[in-house]
Amino acid sequence: MDLNQLLAIKEKELASRRPYTLRCCTAAGCLSAGGDQVKKRLEQAVAELGLSDQVEVRGVGCLRLCCQGPLVHVDPVNELYQKVAPETARQLLERIRGGTVSLETADLHHPFFTKQLSIVLANSGVVDPERIESYIAADGYRALHDALLEMEPRDVIQAIATSGLRGRGGAGFPTGLKWSTVAKSPGTRKYVVCNADEGDPGAFMDRSVLESDPHSVLEGMAIAAYAVGADQGYIYVRAEYPLAIRRLRLAIEQARRLGILGSGIFGSPLNFNVELRIGAGAFVCGEETALMASIEGRRGTPRPRPPFPAESGLWGCPTLINNVETFANVPAIIRNGAEWFASIGTEKSKGTKVFALAGKVKNTGLIEVPMGTTLRTIVEEMGGGAPGGARIKAVQTGGPSGGCVPAELMDVEVDYESLTRLGSIMGSGGMIVMDETTDMVDVARFFMEFCKDESCGKCIPCRAGTVQMHGLLTRILEGKGTTRDLALLEELCDMVKHTSLCGLGQTAPNPVLSTLRFFRQEYERRLKPDRPVHPVALAAGR
Amino acid sequence: MIVTLAKPKQKRVQEVLSRAAGDKRYKILDAHMKKHQHRQDALIEILHKGQELFGYLDDDLLLFVAQRLRLPPSRVYGVATFYHFFQLKPKGKHTCVVCMGTACYVKGADKILVALEGALGVKAGQTTPDGQVSVLTARCIGACGIAPAVVYDGTVAPRQTPEDVLATLQPWLSHGSESTVGD
């Protein structure tokens, strides 16, 4: 494969385009609403009406507005049809022939669409995720080619560093710094790992990226491999995402067949292969050292750091671990330049962030906004507020490691630092809106139950602490708790936070702490009076 | 002492291997292990395949895998029990997975589960006594945009209510009682 061949594929693909394109969403949300049937019926109808040279029916990735699926976007009239049923799908062809349709359209001028800025999701909803040609037609793998043939590995790392890209898995570690650490670490064998173990309940950004544009992740990984000097990559993906697994497998096979993965990529000395590793339902495997243990076929328990994976990772070799969204940003940065990327976002958080907007909000779905967009813009303008005019109470970000931002503070700009200041975290991008009917103590208990079940059991603060905290929360929720229980809960939160081995335990108290900080009255309302302490016990310091 | 302990274990492995010899599914599993060159780090991949073939992982299968990959049975058992995805008991004929992710939870997944458990008389993670339906919960299936979601036999259904769930389950249940009558 060389540049001419790549361009030839692009030309051929563009030449095969028809005047009209019906883009049918085939990501998991729309599929479950019958999106595949809609696509099948449209294909049949096009064949029956002899419109094959006029109309292309293309299966594409996520078209964002998941709550109104199945979605079909009609080009070039630029209309997005929602809730298309297999029975009514045929009407869309009438639209193309100049007739009218009675199907619902989504308002593309709504802030839900206009406030989005797509970098990671640029191809999502446009390219066919099951055909590499479609990705190449959208300038796919051009960044890899240019990086391999026109840039030195250190230039690539410099570009990523200059861009200001930070880890999208949640912690926000500067990506350029991580890459340069791996590049500098001595070792003949190095690995690149993509963390696609999106375990946070309420988050589906990575799933959507993998289902909608798997090649962008592969391209990002290959560029990273070149930059750090790795020749083997792993994608660790959840077993709960069968469609993402299938599309990744297909993408890897197609890339290998074209020589975009394998040996001597684009005639350069880079050899790079990617293997899929399927998770088996353990939340803790999202933690990088646990993830590596799982790739090695062992129980997914974390280990103390240092040594960091960048120095000693998979099988003791230097290993670069980045999140799906981080890798998906890389080709765009190489293609458009680091300065372009750095011009988007806030001072310390550059670029965009993909959020999965869900919960008690009118427009649920996938959004990508520049860093620094306020929570209020996202929830009230884009999300359209709570359904039925209910009052929004809080927004939960960061899943079981994050916290709840109360409605009064929704003017906060979304970036890594601001959310941390409020006791929440950016997290991987799950954003759950809660209205006045949501009980915050119940939410705290929900997350604690999650952490209790998912604790791997290796370190005691997390293994025993989550059980105790869950017990205390249950007591308080059932109206059996006292102020002493609440004090004990707070003490335990502090202890578990500071003494746990890995991120799971260290962040497990966050949902409790943040709801205590902003909704303390909901806890206190439930407390019953303390039993008097016996004077002897009091004298003995309890 | 070591000899007497080791002998029954050896015998057990031999028994497993002889039982496996006549089972086509073990042949497929063996081929899958060969594809991974019997590498020990492929253990999780192989257990996935095993569960796909058998529906669940029983002791025979775990011992078989341990023997082939030259791993101690404790290690294989340890991995199989660590991950929630691996089932050590047979599942029902149908499965009904209620997503308990945050978005589904705040939209009433807990009520769906209560209704389901009430109607079937089993708790989450259990199978009805007639072996018809297994009720399971999922951490999050990533279908938050269409919450609350329930997965019936692998097909995701959007925006479920307790009534929807009971209606969907009805054919499975009546089928179950018919076959009991027929038996």
Image: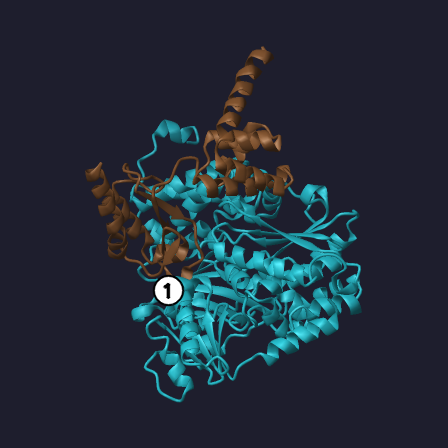
Q: Is residue B173 visible?
A: yes
Q: Position of residue B6 (x, y in %)?
A: 57, 16
For the image, the number of numbered tags is 1
Q: Position of residue B181 (x, y in %)?
A: 19, 39
Residue nearest the viewer, comparing B134 with A361: B134
Residue at the farthest top position: B1
Residue B87 occupies quadrant: top left
Residue A122 occupies quadrant: bottom right
Is A347 placed left or right of B61 in the picture?
right
Instruction: Tell me the residue at 47%/38% (across/down).
Output: A465
Q: Is residue A482 visible?
A: no
Is A399 placed left or right of A263 in the picture?
left
Residue nearest the viewer, comparing A162 with B78: B78
Residue kind at label 1, given as amino acid type: Ala
Where is mark 1, residue-wise?
Answer: A33
Task: Report the chain shown in brown.
Answer: B
Instruction: Tell me the residue at 53%/81% (across/down).
Output: A18
Is B39 placed left or right of A66 in the picture?
right
